[in-house]
Amino acid sequence: MLNDQKQLNLLGLATRARLLVSGEEIVLAEVKKKRATLVIIATDVSDNTKKKIIDKCHYYKVPYKEQFTTAYISHAIGKKRSICAFIDDGFANSYQKLDMS
């Protein structure tokens, strides 16, 4: 299985475990609370949304990745979303390790 597919599977697994939040406002709230451990931004979001999320991530020192399209993320988590965030170190670390291998 390709690493991209494994990462998408992790998004779905974290959603079912309630350790992944999705939606722009919810993700921003989790970033501000410093609960978000890794933010995933779809590659096809608007420039304004992308700037808002990235600025907050920089300010609160939360890592982020621009990866996958809204369609892939939505399919993986079962809701139409383009922004999501892990709120668990284990899932975030597993996700990032797949990027490196």
Image (tube, rainbow, N blue to C red):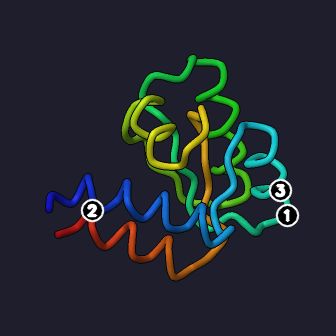
Q: Would you say 75 lies left or right of 35 here? A: left
- Cα distance between the residues tagged 2 and 3: 26 Å
Which residue is the site of mark 3? 32
Please tell me which of labels 2 and 1 falls first in the chain: 1
Callout count:
3
Please tell me which of labels 2 and 3 falls first in the chain: 3
Q: Residue at horizontal 64%, vertical 50%?
A: 58
Q: Would you say 19 lies left or right of 14 here? A: right
Percent position of residue 87, x then y? 67, 69
Q: Which mark is residue 69?
A: none
The quarter of the displayed image where residue 23 is located: top right
The quarter of the displayed image where residue 44 is located: top left
CB under 8 Å between discs 1 and 3: yes
| Viewer-side residue, 61 vs 70 | 70
Q: Residue at horizontal 77%, vertical 46%?
A: 28
Q: Which mark is residue 99?
A: 2
Which residue is the site of mark 1? 33
- Cα distance between the residues tagged 1 and 3: 4 Å
| Residue 41 sits above or below residue 50 on the image | below
Percent position of residue 27, x then y? 73, 48
